[in-house]
Image (cartoon, grey):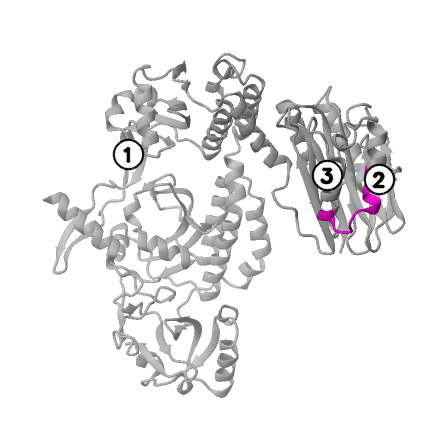
Amino acid sequence: MTELVDDEALQRSADEPIAIPGAVQPHGVLLAVSEPGLDVVVASANAEALFGRPVRALGELLDDDAAARVREGLAGDLAEINPVRLTVAGTEVDLVLHRRDGLLLTEWEPVAGAEQAGAAWHRRLPSVLQRLSAATTLEELGATLARDVRDVTGFDRVMVYRFDAAWNGEVIAEDRREDLEPFLGLRYPASDIPAQARELYTTNWLRLIPDAGYRPVPLEPAVDPRTGRPLDLSGAMLRSVSPVHLEYLANMGVVSSMSVSLIDRGKLWGLISCHHYAGPHRPSYADRTAAEFLGRTASLLLRTTVAADEQEGVVDVAQRAAELAAAIGRTPRALGAALTEQAVTLLDLVPASGAALRLGGRLHLLGSTPPADRVPGLVGALLDADVTAVDSVARVVPDAADLAGTASGVLAVPVGGGDFLAWFRPETLREVTWGGNPHAGKVEQTDAGPRLSPRRSFAAWSETVRGTSRPWREHEVAAARSLASHLVAATLNRSEEDNRLAGALQRTLLLEELPKVPGVALAARYLPSAEDVVGGDWYDLVPLPGGTVAVVLGDVAGHGLAAAAVTAQLRHALRAHLLRAEGPAAALGMLNEVTGALLPGEMATVVVAELDPGNGDVVVASAGHLPVLHAHADGAEFVLGGRGPALGVLDAPAYEQTRLTMAGDDRLLLFSDGLVERLPGGLQEGLDALQAVVAEGPAGAEALLDAVLAALAPPGTDDVTLLAVART
């Protein structure tokens, strides 16, 4: 029965309508008004105390100048005019505006009583931002953020609080009054900040409670008379907060609090949590805005800073993944040996104490693993539960709790047909220190039913966590999945294997869809060899800075998967060099250096035509490839300039380039040798026949390729690749 009550209390906590509390905090006044008349629809009960009289419309509060400023601001972005500094009934106030539920919500906060950091701090803002940007680790970023937010807001304690995957929080940085006990390193359970509160933190960057002992000020009327529903205050800075949260603060001895959200790519990552103990504390609107600005800036830096913190091991895993993938490619008929008997094995891919490979129904074990008869069932249960990586396997497979010594953590990926890859980590005993016993919250009975009552002690409380391994990191899971994808392709029979791998590789070498280039018609054809599905031909179209486009066609010596692997490397390297180099000749020179250094013994040809769609100017450079064919009004001729040796032949050849202009119905044709070298008269006959067809061929790029293939009818004993370019 107790568990049922606890569940009901948890559900009530999760369902608490914190976005529509029906009340505001007393340090300001809220008026919800209609537009365009600005008549008051809902008001907080303290409005008359601030304004000295009941208010029926904003016009009663604003002089002509203030009214004009407000109405002018309403026509634009409200965030750009907030706050509007006004004097109302002899009181200087900051007016903050936003829209919700079809109403204009106006919040009036007296300037008097707000603590000011002063202009000196705000003049230092550039140096504060520079310190944040200079942080190279998460520890440095958090420490800088805590210190500077405390400087501008004046709170007794400022903490940077990070959520884990289960929404438990950990204090990763802190700046505090010297006499306060440290909270750095303490953890807080997810129940401290329920889901609906986290949702509000994701949309509202800042929340302030100047005095946690306040009495809520109700809204009058309690519901919007237009809709019959409570007013949505989720975006209001004066929104009253949950009584449970106020009790939580009181139990901590906190009189005033403020939080600023830290959001990484749209997801709540953590909080800047500010506490004050000496009494009520209300930083000025300007100082709160500065703190929010620091939080937003830090949020933008989180991705790169966290990535830098987690960079350790990423390069090593990527290197080993590449080596294992290469081993699979080299020995497609001995995959078990490739992953278990080479210098780099499956166990080396990610940090783990053991690994398992089941391939063709045969199980291979490496390192420290569960017993062989337990491994298939354990991995199968995880995969059936759609779990790839777990650091506490007993939570998913309770029957595996006895395997904690070898397999508290499991990373498992399927490779088809009941086969799999798996890695194992033993439990790591960890001492976790919480801010108070996270299990000590109470359930109180109220007239509305049971509700959670927060724990009363926040003294450091430690527990030893068992049955949990070091967690798996994203790049480790990605590497396992990538290796499995290689293995999936390689376990097929020879015909299926070649076809599947060919498809995967060709998708990296051939464009699924030609890019749309204004003013240019592009067409491409790729005919694989009937003898080898995968060959060395490739083509590419690379949009370049300045509006030009590079049209590329290349051919790596040889056929099969090895040639295609070289092709992929050359294609991607050339793309990078074209973006940086001063023209195609320079890019080919740089690509030749890559070939010599990283692909010794390999040879390839490639031709690049860089076209300016605006004026038709073309720059052509070739590394040993057959010449480009230029069709124009007077016929067709091969572009013989700008030619150099094939890639990988000489150490440092000087590549040259030549220029031409496409006018009117001019077309360019780039092609591989498979199109022309198989005619009875050899290469020259093929070139002559091609020239004749193109000279008389149609003007359109697609039609030209159709005509060429129909006339020359290449026999299919080699790859055939064609690219046509025409101006429109």
**Number of residues whose C-alpha sits closer than 10 Å to that of mark 3, classed few (under 14), some (14–19) or many (20 or more):** some
Alpha carbon distance from label 1 to label 3: 76 Å
> For residue 691, which numbered disc appears in the image?
2
What segment is highlighted magenta in the picture? 690-703
- Dot 1 crowding, Cα within 10 Å, few <14, some 14–19, many 20+: some
Amino acid type indicated by mark 1: Ser
Instruction: Pick whichever of labels 3 and 2 is earlier in the sequence.
Output: 2
Residue annotated with mark 3: 709
Q: In this figure, which residue is indicated by the disc labeled 1?
A: 462
Is residue 439 at all visible to an observer of this figure?
Answer: yes
> Where in the figure is residue 476, as x and y percent of width and height?
47, 30
Q: Nearer the viewer, residue 530 or 608?
A: 530
Closer to the camera in the image, 22 or 630: 630
Could you say which disc has been placed on residue 530 in the image?
Answer: none
Residue 723 picture location, percent across and down: 73, 41
- For residue 635, side relative to residue 393 (left or right): right
| Secondary element at tag 1 | strand
Q: Position of residue 648 (x, y in %)?
A: 77, 24
- Placement of 627 over or under 76, stated as above or below: above
Question: Label 2 neighbourhood size at 10 Å, few (<14), some (14-19), many (20+)?
Answer: many
Q: Is residue 579 left or right of residue 87?
A: right
Task: Look at the image and say whether residue 699 sits in the magenta stretch.
Answer: yes
Select label 1 or label 3 by which is in front.
3
Mark 1–mark 3 contact, CB under 8 Å? no
Instruction: Please say if 246 is above or below 628.
Output: below
The quadrant in which the C terminus is found is: bottom right
Name the quadrant containing residue 45.
bottom left
Residue appearing at x 46%, y 35% in the figure: 474
Name the amino acid type tagged 3. Leu
The percent position of residue 562, horizontal first and vertical second, equals 64, 23
492 over 628 or under it: above or below:
above
